[in-house]
Image (cartoon, helix red, strand yellow):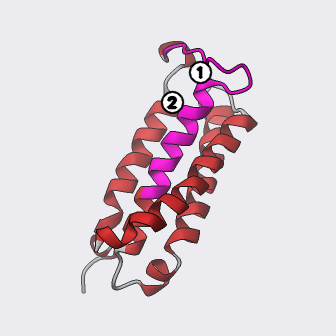
Amino acid sequence: MLPQFIMLRKLWPALAWAVVIIILMSLPGSMLPKARSPWNFLAFDKIIHAFIFFILSFLLMRGFFLQHKHQFLRSNHLLMAIVVGIVFGGLSELWQAVINTARSADIYDFIADSIGSVLAGPVFVRIKNKLT
C-alpha cells in the first residue's frame, strides 16, 4: 500500500502554492511594492489577497476532484476546498499577528481571502469537465 501523501499527489500544486503564500505573508511589509487603487473604496492589496486565495482554492478543488481513491474528497471537492481556503486565510492572518512581527493581521485581508476562496467555486464548476 502506498503512503497517504503519494496517493494525494494531485494536491501537490496546492501545497506548493500554500508554501508560496506563507513566504509572501512572511515578508516585511516594507519589502512589498506600494500600489494604489483607482477606486477609493477598494484597496489593491485586497484584490491581491482575493486572487492569491482564489488560486489556492482552485488548486485544492482540482486536487480533490481528481482523487479517485478518496471518494469523500472527490464528492465534496468544492466545499472542502472553500473551507480549507478560508481556514488557511484565517491562519495566515494569525501568523502575521502572533508570530511574524514584521507584519500585522487585518480582518479585511481575511475577508478578501475568504471571498477569493468562494469565487473559485463557480469558476471551477464551469471548467471542471475539461480536467478529466
Q: Report whether 92 appears left or right of 64.
A: right
Q: Is residue 33 above or below residue 100?
A: above
Q: Residue at x 56, y 37 (%)?
A: 49
| Residue at the disc numbered 2 | 26
| Residue at the disc numbered 1 | 102
**Residue 32 locus on image (x, y percent):** 49, 18
**Residue 71 locus on image (x, y percent):** 43, 86
- The image quarter containing residue 113 is top right
Number of numbered discs: 2
Q: Amino acid at mark 2?
A: Ser
Q: Is residue 52 above or below residue 124?
A: above
Q: Which residues are magenta?
A: 33-58
Q: Report whether 40 appears left or right of 60.
A: right
Q: State how far apart marks 2 and 1 are (Cα).
A: 8 Å
On the question of residue 91 being in view, the answer is no
Give SS at disc 1: loop
**Residue 8 locus on image (x, y percent):** 33, 71
